[in-house]
Amino acid sequence: MFCHITENWRGRPLESQAVVVQLIANTRTAKGLAIRSEINYTFYPTGIKISDEDMAKLSIVRDEFHGEWNYKIYPNNN
């Protein structure tokens, strides 16, 4: 969908979060697929440390191309 979003906001100044969210929300494909978007005002604290033990429990599958950036996290089936 990102190609449709960037096509929709091409040439428009992205002056604020509200403008970006509105442009994303007004994106439609030729076949009618629409995007829903809204600003999330939730505060997410930074600096949270995850233990090596907890990281080892995750089902992470890294992509061959830049696996440090491109990966999938699957649910654990305990």
Image (cartoon, rainbow, N blue to C red):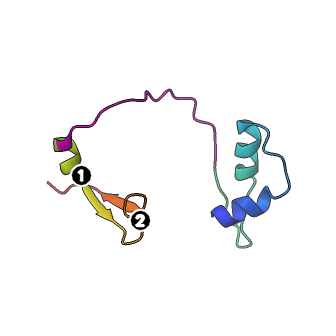
Residue for badge 1? 58
Q: Quadrant of the N terminus?
A: bottom right
Q: Is residue 49 part of the magenta span, yes or no?
A: yes
Could you tell whether 72 is left or right of 33 in the image? left
**Is the residue marked by circle 1 packed among few (<14), some (14-19), or many (20+) residues within 10 Å?**
few
Residue at 58% across / 29% down in the picture?
A: 41
Residue 33 image position (x, y, % from top left): 66, 65
Q: Is residue 18 part of the magenta span, yes or no?
A: no
Name the quadrant containing residue 10: bottom right
Look at the picture and state if 14 lies above or below 71: above
Q: Main secondary structure of the magenta part?
A: loop
Q: Which is in the foreground here, disc 2 or disc 1?
A: 2
Name the quadrant containing residue 47: top left
Amino acid type at mark 1: Leu
Look at the picture and state if 15 lies above or below 24: above
Residue at 75% across / 36% down in the picture?
A: 16
Residue 18 image position (x, y, % from top left): 73, 37
Q: Earlier in the sequence, mark 2 or mark 1?
A: 1
Residue for badge 2? 66
Q: Quadrant of the C terminus?
A: bottom left
Could you tell whether 11 is left or right of 33 in the image? right
The magenta stretch is 37-52
